[in-house]
Amino acid sequence: MKMKAAQAMVECLKAEGISTVYGYPGAAICPFYDALLDAKDKITHVLVRHEANGGHAASGYARISGRPAVCIATSGPGAVNLLTAIATAYADSIPLVCITGQVNTDQIGSDVFQEADITGAAEPFVKHSYLIKNAEDLPRAFKEAFYIAGTGRPGPVLLDVPMDVQNTVIDFKYPASVDIRSYKPTTKGNNLQIKRVLDALSKAKKPLICIGGGVFASNAQKEINELAHIMNIPVITTMMGISAFSDDDPLFFGMLGMHGVKTANAAVNECDVLFLVGARVGDRAVRTPLALEKNTKILHIDIDPAEIGKNIGADLPLVGDAKTVLGQMIEKAKPMQHDEWIAHLDTYRTEREFAPAIEGTVNPRKFIQKLSKAMPQDTVVVADVGQNQIWTATGYHIGEGGRFMTSGGMGTMGYSLPAAIGAKMAAPDRAVMAVCGDGSFQMEMMELATAVQHGVKVKVVIMTNGSLGMVRELQEKGYNGRETAVALDGSPDFIALASAYGIRSMRVTDDKTADEAIKLLAEGDEITLVEVKVDPKASTL
Amino acid sequence: MKHTISVLVQNHSGVLSRITGLFSRRGFNIESLAVGPTHDDEVSRITIIADGDEHTVEQIEKQLNKLIEVIKVRTLAKDECFARELMMVKLACTAEKRSEIMTIAEMTEAKIVDVTLSTVTLEICARYKKLERFIEIVAPYGIIELVRTGTIAIQKGSESMTAKK
């Protein structure tokens, strides 16, 4: 069918089943936006207030829907603003298809208005990218982009489309299939290697499973649960793996790492066989991989062969998709007993004691714990970056069907609110709550308008302590308490700000207001903002 | 330790910058890089000489393989391949030195490709080490200009590295 490439772009999105896109228009992407208007009954365009947040919103959407999500920006500054979101998605292996406008092909390279070499600039952070110079190549590039973003180890793919290309009339036909001769990800595990891994696990006296974000990428929550229970093996997670296993499960021992919990770290230190599933052993999870690798037998499943042996040497590498490989393992797994080992790990479990907070504030961990018990069990909680992230990661109780997300790899501040907006749109029936600090909130607060404009009923919890708490903590411990550039004086009155947007809100200053606010957050599907004044002395360690 | 890495890639525009970008951002050192078309018009072959330990080379291979346009990566052990590099050198050379340089050319299987009143230009195709020795020998005459292609390598025997369609 003859049509402008701009229309073809819309047709490509429809063919991929895309119903929501996040973006910010500009001159170079206008032909596409014009075509998008004709499809407004099929594709909802969400106007974000900053391009990076469009990328984060798409990231939140992708993480909940399990499929690639789309964000859009114009050429030059629009595209460059999107970079932070692309890098954030890349670090956490989130499938995005990022569409940017580009100046006319004959102007590329001449530094015209709003020109930026975005495929060049984004190269370190994309799984792949296309600068589409011939309109005829566009349908194939789109088809490949969605395929590459969503298969193998997921990641962002960039499609840069010059304005004249968007305006070129082509004979549109969406390719039915993809065949890239140089891209054939391995999904099925090698049978012999699977046998070896099972052997090693069954010979282990103190086996431990550590799951990461890859379990979500492959949607293998059910399988990991089943295998752990058949073989009776304790489970811990990285920060990216939180909520892939329920906190209520007796086999679960929490998050490991620098900011992890005692049970998980003790389990890692004492296990004899460590089975890593979709976890890349990042430096915040395992600070000294060399020591671990010396004393422990490491079994490692990852769909990305480059992750195996990169940060930690693996005794048994197993390349494949976690869901498929675990499925293969379950078929052959035999029941095991590790009661003594589990009972031993249980001795590390302690009820956390909450220090009393100073007048006019609450203990952040206590608040988070109470909040988690009141929220619906299937709530999606999106933690931002900083102290709030650690308090939420380690203190928010995740029941069966709950979901935790955060910018784990890149640690991008200002992720939680836009990602929560995307997540809520992917799962309108679930409660979705962003938890952030007064620092991170001020990097994303413009997105309250997006939520209001599009009626996205997210809950926002801002834990305020008047400073960039995580950096302050670092300065306190590592720089002799020389606090610099961390005071957030000049912050607005967050309650007045919420009113300015017409958003219902509440401030927590003590246990009584905490209970009221938690009720407000847990009940009713309405945009809600709660400021929690937390004890400025509260730390993450 | 030096390694010879052969990479088959789809010959799309931008693929070379993806590869060099990968080397620099992952902190891998490239000593030389040679690229050219192959008998398959969709495929180019890149030969990279890189420096690093075993772990580094393993990572280089794996990271290269992750690039969508990379079809095949192979590290060629020294004794399993023929490696060659082409070099051209312009030397300062007056009439009285000409015969000396001609003798050197003969002994080293270099070819004289151009002569002027004040210079002589030689070409030599050999392994990396032999080129290094050649440079040492001719340096005293005064090197005006020196250009090298970077090493290319091919497997010995009937083994081959071709891209499946």
Image (cartoon, coloured by chain):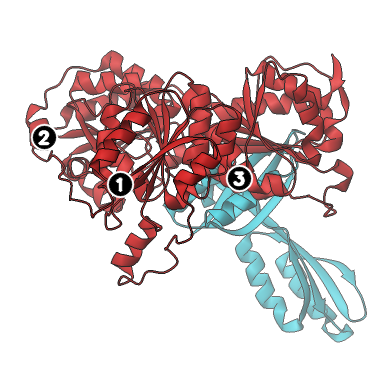
Amino acid type for the residue under numbered disc 3: Ser
Tell me where residue A263 appears, x and y as whole percent: 18, 40
Comes first in the chain, label 2 or label 1? 2
Front-most of residues A184 and B129: A184
Q: Residues within 10 Å of mark 2 (few under 14, many from 20)?
A: some
* Left or right: A150, with B95 as reference point: left
Determine the image quadrant of residue B39: top right
Q: CA distance from mark 3 to mark 1?
A: 64 Å
* Left or right: A315, with A233 as reference point: right
Image disc number at residue A108: none
Image disc number at residue B6: 3
| Residue identifier under label 1 | A509
Front-most of residues B151 and A270: A270
Q: According to the colouring, which chain is cyan?
A: B
Front-most of residues A91 and A395: A395
Image disc number at residue A346: 2
